[in-house]
Image (cartoon, rainbow, N blue to C red):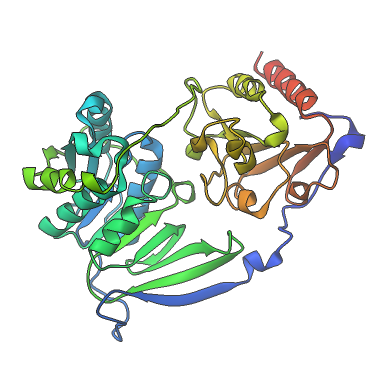
Amino acid sequence: FFFPSSNIIISSLVMSMSMSVSLFRTYRLACGHGFSSSGINSNSRFMSLLVVADASSLQASCRAINAANLAFGASSGTKDPSLSVLVCGSPDDSKELDDAAALFSKVCGVSEVLMAKSNALKHNLPAPMAALVTHVIKTKNFENAAAPNGTFARDFMPRAAALLDSPLIADVVDTVDAKTFTRPSYAGNAMETVERTGDGPTIVTFRPTAFDAAETNDTNAAPVVQVSDDALAAAAGSTSLGEFVSAENKDTGERADLSTARVVISGGRGVGDNFDKLYSLADAFGPDAAVGASRAAVDAGMCANDMQVGQTGKVVAPEVYIALGISGAIQHVAGMKDSKVIVAVNKDEDCPLFSIADVGYTGDLFEAVDRIKEEVQKKKA
């Protein structure tokens, strides 16, 4: 991007909190049987594994499958009979579920895809989802269960872990072995190593942006198997614990999923009701671009909740992250600091986000949007 040199702020990629690269904590999580003195089980490789996939976010699910494969010792690029993928949802979404199952059946390392279709699973409410996952884990004797970390699994995976009397290790970004994982803490300013001890299944959610997507093999698809009627009955029996009220999904066009997009353009409260300009800029970049937002913009009703980037929203790590009118609260930084290139645009030259940005522009954000769009279109012409 080319802006007047007087308005460019170049900063190093060093976080203002240098503790982020030096502070580590190590502790153990135990289930109801207490701590184990035996340490890591050396025979933990090739244990039975269930991955609960998000049919609406195929890329994130494929990354979670790959992460689970790496964590629990399945051989890369082979069909290991220990790995199953659970696809669940409403019969109203049969085409989306069937397409997702067909894709997951071709992922290397997957031996079977479990399909669960029930009206009780519509909207992925936590109680019926947790009941289904718990029933499948118990009846099929899965020793480990995983899911992509995010809004999809954030509510039902902790509930399932509690029903199984097992701890949940959430937002894992790296694995040491089948019982030891690394996850961020203190809004990403520290990394902690967590060791799982005790009996019962290991329940993990993986941060999709920290892992590559699993490879596929079109010539050897795994079978798609329907879950038992008892499993569906377990989900249906939990619907009284909560109900779906309403949801608003604003049309963002045919754009990439925010969690896995190559380019992310995020707007803050300063964008106001002009998010259409951000959509237009995303369209200029192409189908690999997505639009995000700060929590302040979401809370103000400027955009949908699923666009929020940050500690309580989605974690992204695109090649380019463009922050427009975002001050850089620590909660927002936690969700985007792993981006390859960070571009910050703000009229306040003391904006905290400039401290971690690779390129900063002080000035009117709408003028910056027009300039960036113009340059992108020239490059693509």
248 relative to 42 in the view: left or right: right
Residue 255 higher or lower than 213, as above or below: above
**Quadrant of the image for the N terminus?**
top right
Q: Residue at x 11, y 39 (%)?
A: 226
**Residue 190, image x, y percentages:** 58, 66
Q: Nearer the viewer, residue 267 or 101?
A: 267
Q: Residue furthest right?
A: 6
106 relative to 355 in the view: left or right: left
**Residue 222, image x, y percentages:** 17, 39
258 relative to 229 in the view: left or right: right
Residue 226 higher or lower than 146, as above or below: above
Picture quarter containing residue 38? bottom left
Q: Residue at x 56, y 44 (%)?
A: 317
* Residue 319 appears anywhere in the view: no
Q: How many marks?
A: 0
**Quadrant of the image for the C terminus?**
top right
Residue 226 higher or lower than 47, as above or below: above
**Residue 252, image x, y percentages:** 51, 23
Q: Residue at x 29, y 61 (%)?
A: 161
* Residue 2 appears anywhere in the view: yes
150 relative to 125 in the view: left or right: right
Picture quarter containing residue 4? top right
Q: Residue at x 58, y 59 (%)?
A: 187
**Residue 93, image x, y percentages:** 26, 27
Q: Residue furthest left?
A: 229
Q: Residue furthest bottom?
A: 37
Q: Nearer the viewer, residue 289 or 250?
A: 250
Residue 184 higher or lower than 374, as above or below: below
